Amino acid sequence: MTEKAALIDTGWKFDNSYTRLPETFFTRQEPVPVRSPKLAVFNERLAAALGLNAEALQSESGADAFAGNRIPEGAEPLAQAYAGHQFGYFTMLGDGRAVLLGEHVTPVGKRVDIQLKGSGRTPYSRQGDGRAALGPMLREYIISEAMYALGIPTTRSLAVVTTGQSIIRETELPGAILTRVAASHIRVGTFQYAAKWGSPEELRALADYTLQRHFPEVSKGGNRYLALLYGVIQRQAALIAKWMHVGFIHGVMNTDNMALSGETIDYGPCAFMDTYDPATVFSSIDRQGRYAYGNQPYIGAWNLARFAETLLPLLHDEQEQAIKIAEDAIAGYNALYQQNWLAGMRAKLGIFNEEAEDEALIQDLLSLMEKHKADYTNTFRTLTLDPIEETELTKTSDYAEWQQKWHARLNRQQENREASLQLMRSSNPAVIPRNHRVEEALEAAVEDGDYSVMERLLEALSKPYSYHAEQADYCMLPDRSGRPYRTYCGT
């Protein structure tokens, strides 16, 4: 058994509403203690935002709590049950290597989940050991914090502790546990689990809980469950468009990895695109390109259709009518996504108003980038600079022709050039977590115990729109290699 820790001055304020759902949705489960936990990384800025005592949490007892060896007062640890379509195939899942400590309420009344990832076996572990390696946990820390700085809804990382124990994957690796902070861990897969194995009353209870937690503005009149469906569709359309704006590839958009809160969740084989190519895939297990960069909007629609299917009993008593209601709602996703995507792409080009030809102008630039193998982020960064940097792309006659159309478009709006540049600077990051820079930081930390490389990277990523000269090194592309970059799930 893990030891109960007294609430001294750490600042935890737990109020665990999820435990008041039917117990079919979870199993009470304490983390499995580890040998010698040591704090590797701690997010002081996030701790402050959560109203926590950073000094107390960076002590030995804090490391024990982040490892699951000591349970903070008020926490009620549990492992959540859920299902999901993984690469299109439905299966029973659940928190196989994570424990939800509980829900912390911040000083401003915001409720967030506090989850330990890599905390040992649970009833949902199947054949897994319930543990995580240091590299993937540090990777999630880096990418999730970079996404937050980019202004993209995301889970966040409060801490990573090493466990003092090795885990076996292809080789022996140092073990670690990540403390993840999320609006919640309610997924499409949670509803799939309820629809498949729960009772109608349990499904309704989950839907009511989700509405209360994430869509409190929905009134009790009318079809509340249709409002839930619309709310989730709107958030996912906006989220995936933001991914596309910065060249982010999630890598494993299974239905259990789609959070109904609208946050990006589960950073496994994710990465950011360098050379623009809609077919870009980094994940070692995505051999068919199901979750390629250009497919993400379509997979979003597919996942949302699976969510809609779970709500059919709540949408209408007659199944045919329920299906019609759900289909009509899902049919609106494409337009919502396109609206979000176009708005963001206009901003990336300094365009304030709307014209019918804008999409063609944007697509023409993307086609040029693909044709000339241009870097996605640096192309938009270059366009934001005044004067524009000379690159292989901007030296082409193709680009010169496109630039004339772009400048003509800017001249047709009321806002001046400086206003457009300001809009572009706030929409085009100068730095992203380049894959080679992330790997460099992970190698230094895991192999040499040197976290300074990661700290410098995190500092650069914390202000992606600042366009400081000291960011220049983080804008540079990796040396060209014949080997494609590959990421792994890290399980």
Image (tube, rainbow, N blue to C red):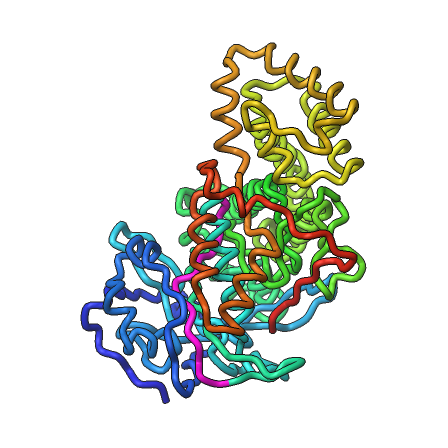
Of 235 and 418, nearer the camera is 418
Q: Outermost residue toward the left?
A: 8
Q: Is residue 422 magenta?
A: no
Apparent side of residue 312 relative to residue 147 in the rendered image (left or right): right
Magenta-drawn segment: 152-165
Label the magenta part by its dominant secondary structure.
strand
Say whether residue 160 is visible: yes
Establish if 135 lies above or below 282.
below
Residue 46 drawn at (x, y percent) = 35, 56
x, y (%) of residue 323? Answer: 69, 48
Query: At 60% from the left edge and 11% from the top edge, which residue is drawn?
Result: 411
Question: How many numbered tags mark residues here?
Answer: 0
Q: Is residue 154 magenta?
A: yes
* Residue beneath the point at 30% across and 73% down: 62
- 412 lies above or below 13: above
Q: Position of residue 483 (x, y in %)?
A: 76, 60
- Please say whether residue 182 is visible from this viewpoint: no
**Residue visible at 47% across and 48% down in the picture:** 461
- Residue shown at 63% from the left, 30% from the top: 342
Q: Is residue 69 left or right of residue 395?
A: left
Q: Nearer the viewer, residue 310 or 360?
A: 360
**In the depicted structure, whether residue 371 falls above or below residue 18:** above
Quarter of the picture containing the N terminus is bottom left
Quarter containing the C terminus: bottom right
Q: Nearer the viewer, residue 283 or 434?
A: 434
Q: Quadrant of residue 352?
A: top right
Where in the figure is residue 439, as x and y percent of width and height?
58, 62
Nearer the observer, 300 or 482:
482
